[in-house]
Amino acid sequence: KLPSQLLLDNTKNLRIVTLGTSNTWGAQLPDRFTEAFPWLLSPNVTNLAERASSPSYSALCIQSMLTEHGTEDHVDVFVLEYVLALDHFDVLTKRLRSRYPNALIIIVELWNPAMNVFRTDTNQRSVLW
């Protein structure tokens, strides 16, 4: 078997929940249900990402979000992706850890070259892209 098939075989029984922004939701992809990264992790993923969001809504409503999707009983892995993980990110992660002490929590930071800001020799602000 190919390594990717072995990985898929080993993850298909995991209960994975993804939370994040438009990137995790799958915005601007022709078929977000097959091309967005959550479904590349597992076809059985529960993607609770919200377009143009911060962690605030998830931090406030995580239990009802999980209940609505039938995943409140047990989650093996949470994958969190937020561009600006400032607003209530700590509240969200503490609630997840408290309610799911055995779950793996993975924090993903997606970036592109335009996000890298640096200073030139003349101390001017510049970006790579």
Image: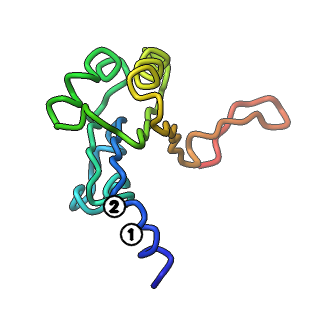
**Closer to us: 29 or 96:** 96
**Which of these two is toward me, 67 or 65?**
67
Task: Please give left or right for residue 1 compared with residue 52 in the image.
Answer: right
Q: Mark 1 near mark 2, Cβ–Cβ under 8 Å?
A: yes
Instruction: Name the residue: 35% across, 36% down.
Output: 19
Q: Residue at x 32, y 27 (%)?
A: 53
Q: Which residue corresponds to mark 1?
A: 9
Q: Residue 30 is drawn in which quadrant?
A: bottom left
Q: Quadrant of the N terminus?
A: bottom left
Instruction: Give me the residue at 31% from left, 37% from top.
Output: 74
What percent of the width, then of the height, locates residue 31? 21, 61
SS at badge 1:
helix
Q: Is residue 58 above or below residue 39?
A: above
Residue 105 position in % (x across, y down) = 49, 36
Q: Is residue 42 left or right of residue 82?
A: left
Q: Is residue 120 left or right of residue 88?
A: right
Q: How is the image coloured?
A: rainbow
Viewer-closest of 20 and 68: 68
Q: Residue furthest bottom?
A: 1
Pointer 1 local density, CA inside 10 Å: few below 14, some 14–19, many at least 20: few
Task: Residue at the far left: name it.
Answer: 68
* Residue 16 screen position, x and y as percent: 35, 46
Residue at x-position 49% and y-position 39%: 104
Residue 102 is tagged as none
Helix, strand or loop at mark 2: loop
Q: How far apart are the alpha carbons under marks 1 and 2?
A: 6 Å
Crowding around mark 2 (Cα neighbors within 10 Å: few <14, some 14 to 19, many 20+) is some
Tell me the number on the disc at residue 12.
2
> Which amino acid, mark 2?
Lys
Q: Is residue 3 above or below residue 75?
A: below
Q: Amino acid at mark 1?
A: Asp
